[in-house]
Amino acid sequence: MSGVVTLAVDAMGGDHAPGMVVAGLNIAAERHPAARFLLVGDEAKLTPLLRRYKRAAETCTIRHTPDAISNDMKPIAALRNRNASMRIAIDAVAAGEAAGVVSAGNTGALLALAKIVIKTLPGIDRPAIAGITPSARGDVVMLDLGANLTCDARNLVEFAVMGDVFARTVLGLTAPSIGLLNVGSEEQKGDERIRQAADVLKESPIGSQFAGFVEGHDIAAGTTDVIVTDGFTGNVALKTAEGAVRLMNALLRQVFSSSLLGRLAYLLARGRLEHLREWLDPRRYNGAVMVGLDGVVVKSHGGTDAEGFAYAVDVAMDMIVHRFNERIRDGLVRMVGPISAALRRDSDEARRLASAG
């Protein structure tokens, strides 16, 4: 894709907005010369910030609104507020003014507004939240991270298709391996919906990439490039991993600061520890994508800083420049036949067994 790319940005979303947002856009503008930002928020707060950040000022256009969606606002209340910065930014995508939107605001409100205003891609039953997490073998794509607490087999297969395209787009993989998160790797493990999804994937056009069932420890091991699960399990796994990283960092600080010998050991290992810190830096993995929507929607962590927000903008630009949604459409077209045939066959078999019983 050539030419200017416009992103709508919710300037008022996030714990440290709008300062963090504008500082982040200043960083992102250096990385993406073709990017332009429709900055939606309180002009009285944004104008002084843009005077401070020259590169952001050159690439941002303010769309004024004094209203914002708070972190504790319920999605139904957010849907009623048409003047909130998040809503106006999403409206810009739906109207074709912007190719995508980035917000560090309320996740539930962002998902609800995006589903209602932007809507899902044709053939997608439900959108999912996809993100990247570190592993022993490199970065891993995981979805769903919380959009859908319960899923059926069709949803899991659609998530696998979207995860495949995400890994190709963001990680640059040519044929990413895909695993279904389960309570065991054996074929008989798990409930009916996950076994049914596995049967469909085995016979699908991406069947050669499907590695079968994976377990919780496989996420950190990097056993597959894409981990597919329902939103309840995915969100628990994500928060558990984040907590483990924080615990490890705290323990390392305690070990290296508790004694003179520890401080000396730190000086000797400082180079490698700095590499580890950069590798596990949560800002590097900031920017979860709400995949399956008819537009690019990226959710930044609410507590991130400017560098982290810039990473979220990086993800949005990758989605747009590499035509992420068009590639999902193509992938779904190839999968429609196998999905329908397998689900219909399983349904017929279930009815046969029921009548025989």
Image: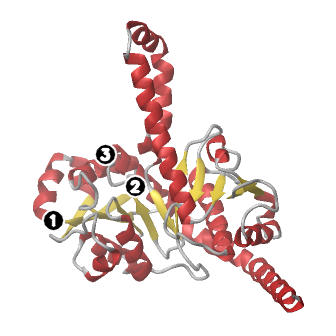
Q: Position of residue 268 (x, y in %)?
A: 47, 11
Q: Position of residue 55 (x, y in %)?
A: 26, 49
- Residue that label 2 marks: 313
Q: Would you place residue 104 above or below residue 326 in this image?
A: above
Decide which of tag 1 and tag 3 comes sooner along the chain: 1
- 285 vs 27, left or right, is right
- Residue that label 3 marks: 305
Q: Residue at the location (70% across, 56% down)?
A: 183
Can residue 323 be seen here? The reply is no
Q: Please, what is the three-letter code of the amino acid marked with disc 2? A: Val
Q: Position of residue 333 (x, y in %)?
A: 69, 78
Say what secondary structure mark 1 lies in.
loop
Q: CA distance from mark 1 to mark 3?
A: 20 Å
The mark lying in front, picked from 1 and 3, is: 3
Q: Residue at the location (37% across, 76% down)?
A: 113
Name the one closer to the observer, 128 or 284.
128
Name the one closer to the observer, 305 or 241.
241
Decide which of tag 1 and tag 2 comes sooner along the chain: 1
- In the displayed orientation, state which residue is furthest to the bottom: 355
- Residue that label 1 marks: 42
